[in-house]
Image: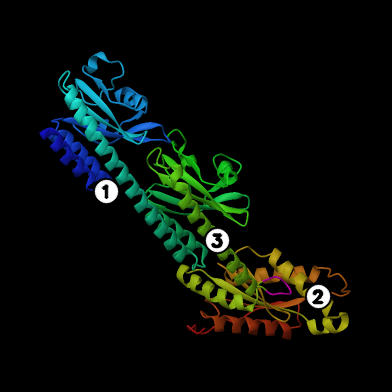
Amino acid sequence: MQKIAVLYDAGQAVLSTFDLDEVLQRILGIARDFFHLQNAAILLIDKEAQQLCVRSQIGWDAGADKICLGWHEGITGSSVLKKQPVYVPDVTKDSHYISCAQSTRSELAIPLMVRDEVVGVLDCQSERVNHFDNETIDLLTMFSTHASIALQNARLYSLERQRARQLEAINAIAQQCTAVLDLEDLLARVCSVVQNAFQVPHVSLSLREDGDLVLRAHEGMLTLCVPRGARLSVDCEPWSKVMSSGGAFIENDLSISPQPFRLFSEAQSRMSIPLISFGQTLGVLTLYSSQKNAFHESEWRPLEAVADICSSSIQNVHYVERIRKLSYLDGLTGIFNRRFFELRIMEEIERAKRSKTGMAVIIADIDQFKKLNDEFGHLLGDEVLRQVSSLFHQHLRKIDVVCRYGGEEFAILLTNTNAQHAMGVAEKLRKLVEGWQFPGVPRTVTISAGIAAFPDHGNGRDQLVHAADIGLYAAKQAGRNRVSLAKRARKASNGR
């Protein structure tokens, strides 16, 4: 009767908390103190991996505390298979025995069951042969029913807490990401928030660009083993499966994969979720772990909700960027407009100051454009503007900027350029226009251009544009169809 009373107290002790780790510790503490066991462990079932994994133990040999067994392996596996206690009085005479402590001589495995389902095993070991008598086995079996209930309660409580945290995380991600309109800032913020909210070692975001996936952002503790901005072919595994899956795609063992395939050196498993918006796959959100079998199907739903939020946010940024780009484009010619020129010239001047390199401004004007309009009409005049714009755009470097400055006037920003090189560029453009046959225009079309360079002709926006304008005026006065370099400034100032 006294033992039953003690057992009741033990059952109440394990049922008095909802913290899973604390429940496990109390179960093992009772096994040690009440049943005088120096070696004991609790193994929990991983359904997806079909394994029994040690979650908590006392007295086992070093390294054995990380062991995972097939859920039908060893004496513990036998108890799962039979759904009843399995006792081996002398482990040296049992072929199923798997050693976890060299001192073990007898082992008792009791399944922890909720209703008819095994959720784990209480594994009790002794240094003595035939240590467990029938009464002790019965008491441990009775105690295991309390332990099973406590374990299930703790798991349900942990699951509810996890779901609550995930809902809070999803809400936080939605609040933080939907208001961000800069793509780089958005991608970095998504990676950071997801990594913290879901407590994973690393998170990456890849976007679809020109048919490939491009690694655009990542956050965490793992080591990147490919260049930032690496291109990942969507025709190769695993990305072809990820892109076609429509849902989460789990790889739970990357150990034999080459590092570039993993993307991060220490990655042992990962979960990838395609970012889909209005039927279009924009990219992939990927979570990484340095442990195998770290991801489970139960985590799909909240992460897919996060992926949906990310997809919408990325799509919003794309829309905003398109609208912003349109606001910087000239409606007639399709090249940048004066608003964009005013923005970029300040950036180029600051860049040239920081890097101690030059930059130049070319102001070009179509000669006698009003007369051309009067002779051939505005529609043909518009076509000349479009073709001149196209010639400039095609024969300048990608890093250079050509803008319609107003009317028939163009402004060109040349990066990392000195005055002499800018003169050469302007002369090349002049000859191109002069030699071009404009359909419907029976005479030659020419341009004049003025050139000013930083810092020779000034170190501010107003000085450079004014100097280029003076150069353009000089070219016009000298007979048109020519280029003219502004006179060197006597004293540079910081005027804009």
The mark found on residue 312 in the picture is 3
- In which quadrant is the N terminus drawn? top left
Of residues 401 and 79, the one nearer the viewer is: 79
What's the residue at 13%, 33% (across, down)? Answer: 3
The mark found on residue 114 in the picture is none
Residue 489 in the figure: left or right of residue 122: right
Which residue in the structure is indicated by mark 1? 18
Residue sitting farthest toward the left: 2
Among the 4 quarters of the image, the one containing residue 267: top left
Q: Main secondary structure of the magenta part?
A: loop
The magenta region covers 330-335
The mark found on residue 445 in the picture is 2
Instruction: Quote the CA–CA distance across marks 3 and 1.
Output: 38 Å
Give the amino acid at mark 3: Ser
Ranked by sequence position, the earlier of labels 2 and 3 is 3
What's the residue at 54%, 47% (across, down)? Answer: 247
Q: Neighbour class for label 1 at 10 Å: few (<14), some, many (≥20)?
A: some
Depth check, mark 2 against mark 3: the one in front is 3
Among the 4 quarters of the image, the one containing residue 447: bottom right
